[in-house]
Image (cartoon, helix red, strand yellow):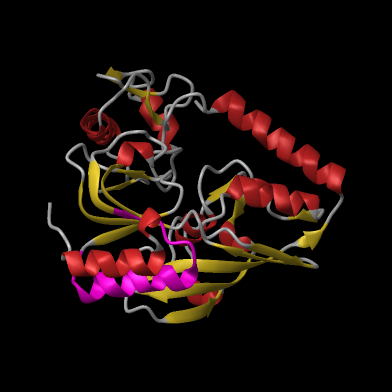
Amino acid sequence: MKKLTDEKIELIKKTIGAGNVMEEEPMKLHTSMEVGGPAAYFFTPETEEDLAFVVKTLTAENYPFYLKGNGSNIIVKDEGYDGAIVETRKLRNVTIDGTTVTAQAGILLKDLSDMILAASLTGFEFASGIPGSLGGAVCMDAGAYDGEMRDIIKTVKLLDKEGNIVEKTNEEMDFAYRHSCCSDGSYIVLSAVLELKEGNYDEIRAKIDDLTAKREEKQPLEYPSCGSTFKRPEGYFAGKLITDAGLKGYQLGGAQVSDKHAGFVINKDHATATEILDLIAHVQEEVEKQFGVKLECEVKVL
């Protein structure tokens, strides 16, 4: 794997702390699908300033890197990633002022949901069970159960690859289905300001419990996965197309199209990344052959 110079690595260690710099780190330990070979480097900065330093340094060195939050929407190939993975999960600060919530990118949506519930604020219930971090959710305009991030975002603080910090309004974020101005990698989410509404604690709790029960009933949460594997094709539902193609429960090695929800490809039995990616490709090929619909993968592959 391509390596940074010893001088650069030492500089990064000195700036962000040696404990936040790992080499040849297996990505199966840091992704929800639990597959993937090693990244040449794995950085876990603890502050926005440290994150900006790492990004600026890697960009100046023309060194490839990928930013991850919870790792719930990426699959790293078995041969690993010849570059740096920069994780934001240590950026978790949250402040709540009235109905305004300001949260850093690394906070998990579940943890943020608990804080918002404790403040009796409503509008975030839809995100309570999405298995990811706030940064990833903002970047892909994550949504579920008739709610999307764009519905509650006021502003977003972003970092470009030169290390400059900018703030964009909701309108400037260019939100669309599973898309934002960050989708092409031009910007990295540092934090977001959410505008919610006052609510009743018991009613909010009841709604979260109801959505959780629906997820547990319909989704294979007991297995490693990346959540919904495919984007919703216009005019169709991916899960129904896959079921109608006769692929529900179809297994390739340790990878399986969930027999609980066909829209989920799961790591059922110590699958490799290759098995999972081959299964995804097989599903796409069969659905297009039978119905003429191209399923687009919602998961990013490194």
Question: What residue is rendered at 26% in x and 57% in y?
Answer: 84
Return the residue nearer the eye: 183 or 134.
134
- Magenta-colored span: 42-63
Q: Would residue 290 be visible to someone looking at this image?
A: yes
Q: Would residue 174 be visible to someone looking at this image?
A: no
Return the residue nearer the eye: 148 or 223.
223
* Quarter location, residue 183: bottom left
| Residue 217 % position (x, y) | 60, 24
Q: Identify whether 267 is placed above or below 206.
A: above
Question: What residue is rendered at 48% in x and 62% in y?
Answer: 46
Side of 163 relative to 289 (left or right): right
Taking the magenta stretch, the answer to whether it contains residue 45 is: yes
Query: How many numbered tags mark residues here?
Result: 0
Return the residue nearer the eye: 33 or 197.
33
Question: What residue is rendered at 55% in x and 50% in y?
Answer: 143
Side of 140 relative to 26 (left or right): right
Side of 62 relative to 249 (left or right): left
Q: Identify whether 213 is placed above or below 191.
A: above
* Quarter location, residue 11: bottom left
| Residue 278 % position (x, y) | 21, 31
